[in-house]
Amino acid sequence: MDSPVLQAIYQRRSIREYTDQPVQADQLREIIRAGIWAPSGLNNQPWRFVTITAPDIRKLISKQTHYAHIVEASQALIAVYLDKNAMYDDVKDHQAAGACIQNMLLAAETIGLGAVWLGQILKNKKKVNDILGLDEHYDLMAVLALGYPLHRKQKSNRKNLNEFILKSF
Ligand SMILES: Cc1cc2nc3c(=O)[nH]c(=O)nc-3n(C[C@H](O)[C@H](O)[C@H](O)COP(=O)(O)O)c2cc1C
């Protein structure tokens, strides 16, 4: 596999266990930079981010998800938002957020960090906004938990490619 992009796509796994090595601010910025280079409809770039390394805030955020243990084990969080004031089309802006988040996961992978996309926390997105001091025109899309992987033994699988292809003309 020669392509570094394909290599990152196939090697990336959701990482939920981390060492206690801190994640640096410039690493978080690089991950966000990769996120903002995702495509968006009309190039409207509706995404916004909050980076969190402060232990007290991470603790508060951890209480908003069933996956508290992952948040607590991680060294940094990035909350990914859509700015409702910057949106122009509900479906397309949400698609752009997904592309942005995937870019961020791949960037984390290529700089040696591990990350997991936390979606279950969205059930408490109002409380997350309250903790972060954000009003409701910022709509939480995901929280990424980040850190150096404790190990790389994660396994995942996908169904056979042929199961997804409806037709080939
Ligand atoms: C929209 C979305 C929400 C997710 N929410 C969670 C979550 O709340 N907790 C968690 O541990 N993993 C979460 N994941 C990660 C998935 O469980 C994971 O991507 C999937 O099992 C495939 O594993 P892989 O990423 O290692 O290939 C989420 C992934 C997506 C795309």
Image (cartoon, rainbow, N blue to C red):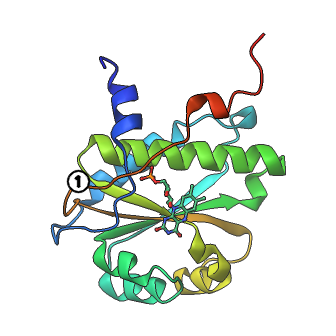
Point 44% across, 84% down: residue: 62
* Some atom of ligand 1 lies within 8 Å of the CB belonging to the residue at label 1: no
Looking at the picture, tell me which residue is in the foreground, 67 or 164: 164
Q: Is residue 59 left or right of residue 47?
A: left
Residue extending farthest to the top is 169
Q: Is residue 163 above or below residue 156?
A: above
Q: In this image, 93 relative to 30: left or right? A: right
Asked which quadrant contains residue 43, the reply is top right
Q: Nearer the viewer, residue 54 or 155?
A: 155
- x 57%, y 81%: residue: 128
Residue occupied by mark 1: 152
Task: Name which residue lies at 40% across and 27% down.
Answer: 6
Question: Residue 58 appears in which quarter of the rendering?
Answer: bottom left
Indicate the quadrant containing the N terminus: top left, top right, bottom left or bottom right. top left
Between 7 and 138, the one nearer to me in the picture = 7
Q: Which image quarter: residue 60?
A: bottom left
| Above-or-below relation of 31 to 54 | above
Figure label count:
1
Q: Amino acid at mark 1?
A: Arg
Q: Nearer the viewer, residue 72 or 28?
A: 72
Which quarter of the rendered picture does the C terminus lie within? top right
In the depicted structure, whether residue 69 falls above or below residue 154: below
In the rendered view, does 92 fall on the left or right side of 132? Answer: right
Toward the right, the furthest residue is 89
Q: Position of residue 164 (x, y in %)?
A: 67, 33
Residue 57 spot, x, y in % from top left: 40, 84
The residue positioned 19% from the left and 67% from the top of the image is: 22
Residue 17 picture location, percent across and down: 28, 68
Q: Is residue 53 above or below residue 92?
A: below
Of helix, strand and loop, which one carries label 1? loop
Crowding near the residue tagged with mark 1, few <14, some 14–19, many ≥20 C-alpha atoms within 10 Å: few
**Residue 41 percent across, percent down from the top left:** 74, 36
